[in-house]
Image: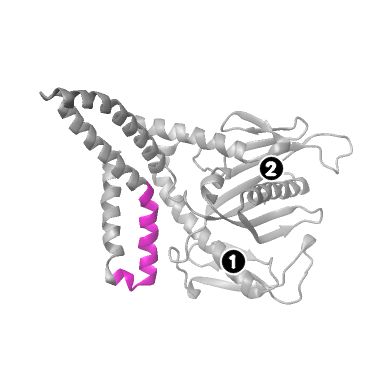
Amino acid sequence: MREELDAKLARFEELERLLADPAVLADSQRMSSVAREHGGLARVVRRYQAFLAVEKDIAEYREMLTGDDTDFRELAETELPILEKRRDEEWDVILDGCLDDPDADRSRCIVELRAGTGGDEAALFVRDLFEMYRRYATEIGWNVEVMDASPTELGGFKELVIGVSGGEVFRQLQYESGGHRVQRVPNTETKGRVHTSAATVAVLPEPEDVEVSISSDEYRKDLFCASGPGGQHVNKTTSAVRLTHLETGIVVQCQDEKSQHKNFAKALRVLKTRIYERQRQIEHEKRASERKGLVGSGDRSQRIRTYNFPQNRVTDHRLNQNFNLDQILAGRLNLLFDAMAERVRQERRSGAVAR
């Protein structure tokens, strides 16, 4: 762990030199990249520097304990417990910072919601999940924009892609990725039987433009007429945009805006985000053995939560903990997020100690 921190400190000092380099200052893209990496390291490195300073003070006071000066020995006996407590506190903060996802401080992310098993009921559940996230975002001042939507005739969504921006967006939403299951009596059910439906959520950190550069010859652009519920055309102009990344085969589309240019801009944002996520997954697989079994592993195939309407209960299967359904659907997600953050923090710190 100390070797990793020393490497971060060395890299941070190198980045500070680069930020003062005239050649870097003259290159806006490189400057932006260096500044972002510098900012990403700053919090942990500043803490580590404070930790090292406290360690140095502790070493000096311990030398005083072995000296002949009575006053110095008494001073050391008084100060050492205080400094050692401060050192332990700094180390706890450092552990949390070092073990965070490298993208934890992202202020923008893409959230993709897709209906799974359950037909129309699953699509309605996607709408409920969207409203749940929207209410939470409104409560804390985040901005939510619809990037793409595939509505159904009953008011649900087969697929819904939204952009969310604001403070600590990815840090809080990252553990929402996975399978969400709902148990309730559908409005179309005449015999009062409880049905089980499912939806998946994927939360992807949105990169800065300079981090993922795509030229126009790297993707195919197709234009088509936007469609509404049931597939009927809602616009006679070809305003909808579909982009296909030639190297990876990733396909995105956007038809929410009436303007072709706005749809293209949104589609390009989603495409860059998915390409960046693909790169993240490669890095994630390299660290998979270290993270195996952690509740915050981010595995989208993992069933993470059940929303039981008859019992007014939400069960988070990673936490093995129940929450009030009405509160959660009303947007009180801080109840879940706080519990999840504490659980992940404990697991990561115990894992760091074990290693």
The residue shown at (19%, 28%) is 62
- Going by the image, does 225 lie left or right of 162? right
Q: Position of residue 132 (x, y in %)?
A: 69, 46
Left/right of residue 113 with respect to residue 308 in the rendered view: left
Amino acid on which disc 1 is placed: Ala
Could you tell me which secondary element the residue under label 2 belongs to?
strand
In the rendered image, the residue lying farthest to the left is 68
Left or right, 111 with reference to 189: left
Does residue 241 lie above or below 111 as drawn? below
The answer to whether 331 is drawn above or below residue 208 in the figure is above
Residue 257, relative to residue 346: is it above or below?
Answer: below
- Dividing the image into 4 quarters, which one contains the C terminus? top left
Rendered residue at 66%/32% (across/down): 323
Question: Which quadrant would the N terminus be assigned to in this image?
Answer: top left
**Which of the pair 108/235 is nearer the observer?**
108
**Where does label 2 land, which residue?**
198
Nearest to the observer: residue 243 or residue 351 = 351
Quadrant hosting residue 330 = top right
State the image coordinates of residue 297 (x, y, percent, origin top left).
Answer: 49, 40
Residue closest to the eye, 98 or 221: 98
Q: Where is residue 224 drawn, in percent x and y? A: 68, 72
Q: Find disc 1 in the rendering and name its residue.
A: 267
Q: Quadrant of residue 313?
A: top right
203 in the magenta segment: no
Residue type of the residue flagged with mark 2: Ala
User: Which secondary structure dominates the residues rendered in magenta?
Assistant: helix
Instruction: Classify 10 Å Cα crowding around label 2: few (below 14), some (14-19), many (20 and above).
Output: many
First along the sequence among labels 1 and 2: 2
Highlighted magenta segment, given as a residue range: 23-43
